[in-house]
Image: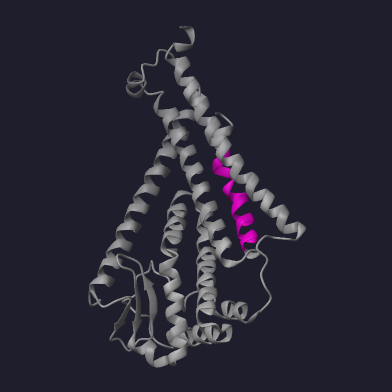
Amino acid sequence: MIFSVWIPLLVPFLAVPAARRLAEALPPRPAAWLLAAAATGLAACSTAALGLIALAGALRLPFFASLEDLTSPLDALPAWLAFPAAATAAGLVAASCVALIRTARRHLAELRAAHGRLTPGTGELAVLRDPTPDAYALPGRPGRIVVTTGMLRALGPAEREALFAHERAHLKSRHHLFLAAAELAAHCHPSLRSLRAPLAYALERAADEYAAGAVGDRKLAARAIGRAALATRAAEPSAARPRAVLAAAAGPVPRRVAALLDRRPAPRLPRSRGARLIAAVLLGCLCASAASAVEAAADLHGGIEIAQGEAQR
């Protein structure tokens, strides 16, 4: 455990750049799954490692040692390292939990307030009387496509359909859960915060492709997104939109429009040698992080059994 418990805490610094590079070589939907899975897996392993460090230090205290019936000192970590490391790990886990709870409460409050502004039972589309151009997918039961009267005036009928298809893709594919996973991961390890922006971009690109397929015209979808972004940025930001929702006018719109106008089919799997190497590095990082966390847990369990005197029975 002395060495293996630190690996899940260091691996994200290598895995995150690899995940970002690999996502750029994938189509939007696989890229979103890759980034969300990498963030969740790395966060789980790093949090487990912190928990094991905190537990190893706590079991050296008489009170916790008595709870486990330890008859000899636990040697999972050296004595000079156990208490400082355990205190730091416990503090980091507590800070992450507090930040996560606060973020979750704020997002839920904003979503409830946003639903409260809508007329109940009026179908999937909800129109807000607001001159500020805006449109977004509001998750919930049921999920709603929210559009302001200002946005409706800024787009033509065909562009509106493309915009609605984009927001419908967010609701249909439950993209808000991907963002929630990235937010959770960002609170668990500092390096994972840099995965939120590429994940949001991948989700917007996936919705762009869905909208292009729904209206049958990539140029129309690109024009609708571009005009919606121009209308949104020319006005003051809308206070009605929750921060945790996805919107067609968000993110690097010029890059998204250029991708829609590019008719070359994106490969489903990375074909270049460099991309395959990055994929191998990322997979190795994930496996090493998980295996190290499991090994550290097994070592700690074995140390507890020895300290309990079961090895001599």
Q: Is residue 14 magenta?
A: yes
| Residue at the image point whose x is 60% and y is 42% from the top | 287
Q: Residue at x 44, y 93 (%)?
A: 156
Q: Is residue 152 visible?
A: yes
Residue 77, can we see it?
no
User: Between 83 and 49, which is closer to the camera in this rendering?
Assistant: 49
Up/down of 6 relative to 276, above or below: above
Q: Position of residue 237 (x, y in %)?
A: 38, 80
Q: Which residues are magenta?
A: 7-23
Q: Position of residue 21 (x, y in %)?
A: 65, 60
Residue farthest right in this picture: 273
Residue 196 painted magenta = no
Q: Is residue 156 left or right of residue 12?
A: left
In the image, 180 versus 308, the foreground residue is 180
Name the residue rendered at 39%, 87% in the picture: 151
Quarter of the rendering occupied by the C terminus: top left
Picture layout, residue 84 above or below residue 237: above
